[in-house]
Amino acid sequence: MRIDILTLFPEMMTMFFQESIVCRAIKKGIAEVHFHNLHDYSLTRYGSVDDYPYGGSAGMVMAVEPLANCIEKLQAERHYDEVIYTAPDGELFSQQTANQLSLLENIIILCGHYKGIDERLREHFITREISIGDYVLSGGELAAAVISDAVIRILPGAIGDEQSALEDSFQDGLLAPPEYTRPPEFRGWRVPDILLSGNHAKIAQWRYEQAIQRTRERRPDLLKQSRN
Ligand code: ADE
């Protein structure tokens, strides 16, 4: 899978992709992430890509032409399945969206800034608008990193133990059950006996019950949406 990220701050972005599962997936050739500096598409001497909004409201708007030029240059090189714009008024990002995006071949993620982008870009280039939560960030870079991370980590082969991505919170509409590792006892706090029993069927049942209980306590809204 290939992700092209269009940003005003490519240096800020690169660090997110230099560690951990995402970095390993890139090194293994499972994912490619390319950054494009929108300043390189500026039509001005100063490298700016924003302008004053028509109608006189406060703030600046990312202009249509430099961003359109950048998107069209990429689209001339290959087909993109989605051109995503990160914005607080987009659809709320979820595990389900991450799963859908992970099936795609090539995607563009445009990071918004200032008051946002000229509406004509949204009408003519953007195919999907995604928000990572009901709060406003100073730019779309963190959102692009969140989306890329959630998508890349579930690509086949990205996580060594395939099963563990399937057991993530949200994958079956439930939060994940508690996990323990050695030692079996620390300061008198014992790992539940069932996990040490070696009875895989009983352990699976216990984990399922714990997941239901945790979801009921913390995110009852998820239970209403799922079949559990
Ligand atoms: N840009 C600013 N705020 C955002 C948010 N909540 N999600 C995605 N992109 C954003």
Image (spheres, rainbow, N blue to C red):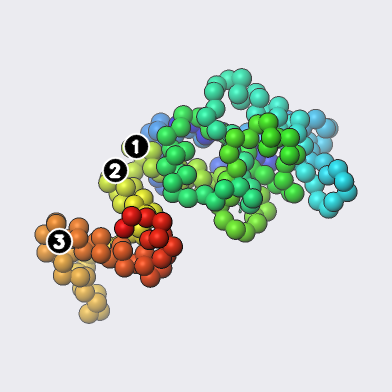
Q: Earlier in the sequence, mark 2 or mark 3?
A: 2
**SS at badge 1:** loop
Q: Earlier in the sequence, mark 2 or mark 1?
A: 1
Q: What amino acid is labelled 3 in the image?
A: Lys
Residue 165, x across and y down, in percent: 33, 47
**What is the distance, in whole Å, between disc 2 and disc 1 at their CAs?**
7 Å
**SS at badge 3:** helix
**What is the distance, in whole Å, between disc 1 and disc 3 at their CAs?**
29 Å
Residue 153, x across and y down, in percent: 40, 44
At x 58%, y 39%, the residue is 128
At x 74%, y 49%, the residue is 114
Q: Can you identify the residue that label 1 sits on?
A: 156
Asked whether residue 181 is in view, the answer is no
Label 3 Cα neighbours within 10 Å, binned few <14 / some 14-19 / many ≥20: few
Residue positioned most to the bottom: 188
Q: Nearer the viewer, residue 16 or 215?
A: 215
Image marks 2 and 1: residues in contact by CB distance under 8 Å: yes
Q: Can you identify the residue that label 3 sits on?
A: 202
Asked whether residue 157 is in view, the answer is yes
**What is the distance, in whole Å, between disc 2 and disc 3 at their CAs?**
22 Å
Identify the mark at residue 162; answer none if there is no mark: 2
Residue 207, x across and y down, in percent: 24, 61
Q: Nearer the viewer, residue 210 or 138?
A: 210
> Compared to 22, does 80 lie above or below?
above
At x 29%, y 43%, the residue is 162
Find residue 184 and report its image quarter.
bottom left
Q: What amino acid is labelled 2 in the image?
A: Glu
